[in-house]
Image (cartoon, rainbow, N blue to C red):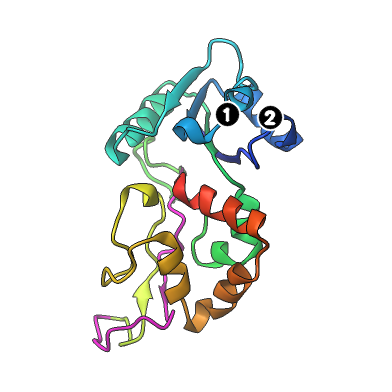
Amino acid sequence: MTVHFIGAGPGAADLITLRAQRLLAACPVCLYAGSLVPDKVLAHCPPGARLVDTADLTLGEIVAELVAADAAGLDVARLCSGDPAVFSAVGCAACHVPALQTGPNVNPVFHRKSVALFSDLLLHDIGTGDGIRQEAASPLEFRTPALWGLRLRRPLLHDGTAATIEDAISHHGGEAAQARARTQALAPEQRNALLAFLKSL
């Protein structure tokens, strides 16, 4: 089973990519971000597909849907509002890696599975350190948090100083300073697409 993260684009069904259309048509399960995704985009899903509106689901309920799809051997389209391409283009995906693969495991549930964490699980200095050395982390470093489930979490950052996604982005410095600068330089429609994508995770 594979989970495909697909951007719904700016909202018009005829503006999603050909690859997105192909993946939607091939996946028997589609998780989508409620009213943020137009019905005309969902029309690309195959007849009889299981369409799951995740707007009011908890992270645990979303995971349960993925586990059920995996047990049935079904690929899943995770249809996100906005555009994940902007997320990668500004450099967010350098640390918030969209998916990692598990290693070999005797249990087939965990054997070489793609996990959409949006994290590299590594230590980085993004300029928000608290000055406390913890294990291998220097006083300026923190482990990249997973963004999966971001729409359900507030406040943000390790110390809770960011009330919104925009606040969290503006606090990024150090290794993330260039990604922050590229994000701040986005045209309004690109910035909106990025924020819509992040709010759909």
106 lies left or right of 39: left
Q: Residue at x 63, y 36 (%)?
A: 11
Asked if marks 1 and 2 touch (Cβ < 8 Å), the reply is yes
Does label 1 or label 2 sit earlier along the sequence? 2
- Magenta region: which residues? 114-135
In the picture of the structure, the residue carrying the numbered disc 1 is 38
Q: Quadrant of residue 154?
A: bottom left
**Residue type, label 1:** Pro
Q: Is residue 3 visible?
A: no
Secondary structure found at label 2 = helix
- Between 93 and 173, the one lying in front of the other is 173
Q: Is residue 40 visible?
A: yes
From the image, give the main secondary structure of the stretch colored magenta.
loop
Secondary structure found at label 1 = loop
Q: Residue at x 38, y 61 (%)?
A: 164
**Residue type, label 2:** Ala
Q: Quadrant of residue 130?
A: bottom left
In the rendered image, residue 22, in percent from the top left (x then y), is placed at 70, 28
22 lies left or right of 158: right
Q: CA distance from mark 1 to mark 2?
A: 7 Å
In the picture of the structure, the residue carrying the numbered disc 2 is 13
- Between 96 and 83, the one lying in front of the other is 83
- Between 75 and 48, the one lying in front of the other is 48
132 magenta-colored: yes
Task: Classify mark 1: residues with Cα within 10 Å, few (<14), some (14-19) or many (20+).
Answer: some
